[in-house]
Amino acid sequence: MRVFVIGAGNMGLTYAMGMSQSSLLGNKKIQIYDTDPDKIKTLKEEGVFEVHTSLEDCLGKVDIVFIAVKPYHSTSLFEEMKPLVRNEQLFISLMAGVTIETIQEGLQIDKVIRTMPNLPAKVGKGVTSYTESNSVSRIELLTARHLLDTTGTSIHVDTEKFIDASTGISGSGPAYVFYFMQSMLEAALKMGFSDYDSKVLVSNTFEGAIELFNQSDISPEHWIDKVASKGGTTQAAIDSMEDNNVKQLIQDAAYAAFDRAVELGKE
Ligand SMILES: NC(=O)C1=CN([C@@H]2O[C@H](COP(=O)(O)OP(=O)(O)OC[C@H]3O[C@@H](n4cnc5c(N)ncnc54)[C@H](O)[C@@H]3O)[C@@H](O)[C@H]2O)C=CC1
Ligand SMILES: O=C(O)[C@@H]1CCC=N1
């Protein structure tokens, strides 16, 4: 199977690396293309992928095309791709907001899988939601799932609304976690800890909490109860967050990302 990735950025490279491990490729390398000459040069030197400097020599010959450019580059990219693509090919988009219909119309093709990945895919801990156009067969869907799972885990959703919604939860979500971490790091520094000690305190707190959560069926709310003693320190912190409506603010932020994904689809 010949797999081609367009856009060798955070996501494109991450998926290309993950998919390189897939048995579905046989002995073929992942093919990759980017418009940035510096990236092309580095990728050629590394020799992991079959690197292309134009679409003409390869796009028509591959089976699956991953599109991993920024949404605002999609219109011009589609113009360039359109004369070179075939309707039997499967297109898998990683782009936030860009709808299946836009991709079908832009490329004049039928088979599209729209996904929403996230950055922990870089370390094999990504989560990708995906949905497909009507003409994608069951076997193509299974193949796509296998490829997506090379970077972590995936969930199938029935409609594109859930792709936009998962953008607000898992796609943008790592940034919310980093925001929380940054806030805790800044608090630790203000309290007088060194950079190193602040990082150890914060990263181990996150890692330990996630591990506890993953190893049980207990909800985060109940875990909070296990940390908080009546009238104690944790309760003081949670009361402060509740008084400041932090939970609602986080939910508002997730909805802002969801709404922005829907908006991007209309631009
Ligand atoms: N970074 C993230 O955490 C997530 C990103 N996404 C989506 O993934 C897509 C890519 O995002 P990133 O990888 O973060 O962006 P990036 O900026 O790291 O990578 C985009 C790459 O596309 C290349 N490019 C631009 N125009 C091109 C063209 N016409 N042909 C070929 N290559 C072209 C750029 O040179 C760049 O290397 C976006 O659509 C974004 O919505 C989705 C979920 C998470
Ligand atoms: O911020 C963005 O638009 C992309 C989509 C989800 C994460 N990064």
Image (cartoon, rainbow, N blue to C red):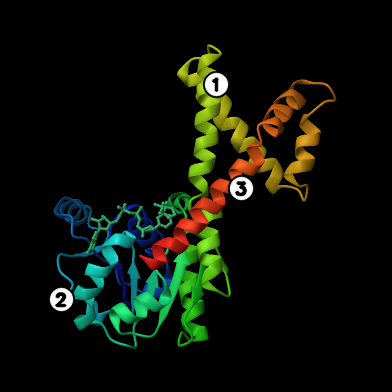
Q: Which residue is mark 1?
A: 187
Q: Which residue is mark 3?
A: 251
Whole-percent x, y for residue 58 in the image: 20, 76
Amino acid on which disc 2 is placed: Asp
Q: Quadrant of residue 15?
A: bottom left
Q: Residues within 10 Å of mark 2 (few under 14, many from 20)?
A: few
| Chain-order first, disc 3 or disc 2 | 2
Q: Is residue 69 visible?
A: no
Please give the name of the residue rendered at 35% of the width and 61% of the height, measured from the top-left corner.
16
Q: Which residue is mark 2?
A: 57
Lateral position of residue 184 relative to residue 230, left or right: left
For the N terminus, the quadrant is bottom left
Whole-percent x, y for residue 54 in the image: 15, 69
Q: Return the residue nearer the eye: 194 or 76.
A: 76
Whole-percent x, y for residue 61 in the image: 24, 81
* CA distance separating discs 2 and 1: 54 Å
| Chain-order first, disc 2 or disc 1 | 2
Nearest to the eye among marks 1 and 3: give it: 3
Q: Are marks 3 and 2 in contact (CB under 8 Å)?
A: no
Element on which disc 2 rests: loop
Element on which disc 1 rests: helix
Amino acid on which disc 3 is placed: Gln
Q: Residue furthest top?
A: 192
Q: Residues within 10 Å of mark 1 (few under 14, many from 20)?
A: few
The correct choice, above or below, for 266 with respect to 241 in the image is below
Lateral position of residue 76 relative to residue 220, left or right: left
The correct choice, above or below, for 38 with respect to 178 in the image is below
